[in-house]
Amino acid sequence: MSRSLLLASAAFGALALLPAAAMAQCTPDNPSSGQTVTCAADDADGLSDGSNNVTVNVNPGVTVSSDPGEDAFNLDGNANTVNNRGIIDGDDEGVQFEGAGSAVNNFAGASITGGDRGIDADGVANIAIDNAGSITGTGSDAIRVGDGATITNQSTGTIAGGDEAVQAGNNLTLVNHGVMTAADEGIEADNNATLTNTGTISSADDAFQSNANAMIVNSGLIESSANDAIDIDNGTVINTGTIRALIGGEDGIDFDPAVDTSIVSVVDNRAGALIEGEIGVNVDPLNDSAQSIINRGTITGRSGVALFLEDGNDSLTLFASGVLNGVSDFGAGEDSLILSGDQAALVGGGSLFDGGADTDTVMFDFASANVISLVLMSAIAPEAFALNFLNADGSTSSVLLANFELFAFTDGTFDFDALAAAVPLPASALLFGGALALFGGLRRKSKIARN
């Protein structure tokens, strides 16, 4: 062979290699179980595989995309892991899992986007996602997972859904330090969901919606623009941040009809915290479960109703720092208002506490001799009366009540007639002069029926 022919052949061979380099695949592109796939250069047709225990590493600066209508990664086996430091962009799903026990670690600066969902593991159990970058579902959910999912959104992380940010099955554990936004519901889960939020969760529909036995610990912002900030059947909410349904939305916290009436739901609103909505805390009709409200913060009902607790043996424990902007309506059931510690001059900010139907009790942590006067307040409501008392520190407080039948002190429990008979009536005009002026501006708001 001539020297010129050899050179031509070599040149042709070198050119033949160029298209392969330009279309570099994540390698190996047909891994066996237990292998590691490395995406070191851009890949335009993604990876589809059915093996188990495969680890995929997408390097910084690398983009893995898909053919039209396909997923960037479609991993059907169990216990697969995607570690993303680059860009994953699927025309359908960004990452699709079919196998249980799979995981995604999306690092700071990295992104996962799907034309439908960012990460789709619909009905797949025990998925773990740790996000410090961005996960976006343009046409649907950012993340959809089955039972037992664990999701952590770090302080640098964003999760954005064209529908929901996260949709999950039972036993979801979600920790959010970053930002989650959704065009529909922020987070939707089934039973036994746990949310810890120090960041921001913002949605058009319910910001957090789940069924039975929810546990929510919030020190950040949970906010809805068109529905409830939190909508659950029953569970516990501990709030040191803000839970708010904006104007045009509905309630701060809404309890749907609960199946298990033996469970007592708890709302613990701590000092400096805010719960706000058309009704601050609302219990829907047909919910016969009990709610226990503990308030050191502020609960605001823009409709004029701060609490609407429906049926069940409900309780409100109120501390001096606790404010209720609007009526506290306890509804039917044997309810309790518990005044704990020294109270503000106007208890709860001066709004009305209405015990509703059945036998209801106000509990004090001092003796009955501390009661100074009882004044009927018929201008506010036919059943309304103001009770003036001395706190343990000697300060004077006034509480506005209606439809409470029993009054429990450290030295015994009195019904209304016995309490009224024991109160020194001549003191009422002197000691209630200032309180009457402030209470006089209040008017009983009508109950709001919620569907």
Image: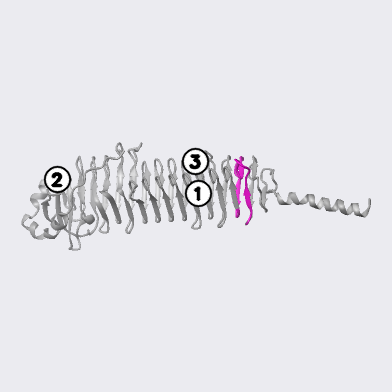
Write down the residue under mark 2: 383
Q: How many marks?
A: 3
Write down the residue under mark 3: 147
Label 2: how many residues lie within 10 Å, few (<14), some (14-19) or many (20+)? some
Q: 159 or 230, which lies in front?
A: 159
Q: Is residue 69 shown in magenta?
A: yes
Three-letter code for the amino acid on which mark 1 is drawn: Ile
Label 1: how many residues lie within 10 Å, few (<14), some (14-19) or many (20+)? many
Question: Percent x, y for residue 288?
Answer: 29, 38
Write down the residue under mark 1: 151
Magenta stretch bounds: 61-86
Three-letter code for the amino acid on which mark 3 is drawn: Asp
Q: 430 or 74, which lies in front?
A: 74
Q: Height in image: 390 above or below 39?
A: below
Question: Percent x, y for residue 31?
Answer: 69, 44
Label 3: how many residues lie within 10 Å, few (<14), some (14-19) or many (20+)? many
